Image (cartoon, rainbow, N blue to C red):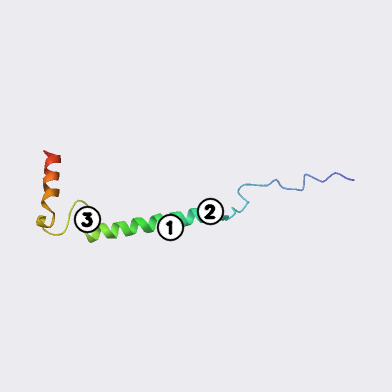
Amino acid sequence: MSQPNLESASPPSALAKKPQLNVYTVMLIVALLSLMLACLFLWLEIREYGGWGSYKGSLGAVTQPVVDFARSMWV
């Protein structure tokens, strides 16, 4: 049996090899899309209520025990 000619065979290259799309890559893409969609919905929900640190409605809509508790925390 003769030896194979190694000079004609090109060595495998990382640049020439096409990356495989396996189940873990698909799960990573699905997770990324889910997180981006969740961030979008959170931003829309916060914008619906007036932005960061604000609220809609009068202060009278908050019950008195909650207001008293909040005042005691900041005093």
Name the kind of residue labelled 1 in the image.
Answer: Leu
Name the residue at 12% across, 49% down: 65
- Dot 1, crowdedness within 10 Å: few (<14), some or many (≥20)? few
Real-space Cα separation, disc 1 to disc 3, in angstroms: 24 Å
Mark identifier at residue 33: 1
Q: Secondary structure at mark 2?
A: helix
Label 2 sits on residue: 25
Vertical arrangement, residue 3 with respect to residue 54, above or below = above
Question: Residue tagged by mark 3?
Answer: 51
Identify the residue shown where x is 50% and y is 55%: 27
Query: Residue furthest toward the right?
Result: 1
- Does label 2 or label 1 sit earlier along the sequence? 2
Provide the secondary structure element on which disc 3 rests: loop
* Residue plotted at (22% across, 55% down): 51
Which residue: 81% across, 46% down?
5
Q: What percent of the width, then of the height, locates residue 22?
A: 58, 55
Which class describes the residues within 10 Å of circle 3: few (<14), some (14-19), or many (20+)? few
Residue 11 image-quadrant placement:
top right
* Residue 50: % across, % down: 20, 58
Q: Is residue 15 left or right of residue 55?
A: right
For marks 2 and 3 on the same chain, the one whose residue lies earlier in the sequence: 2
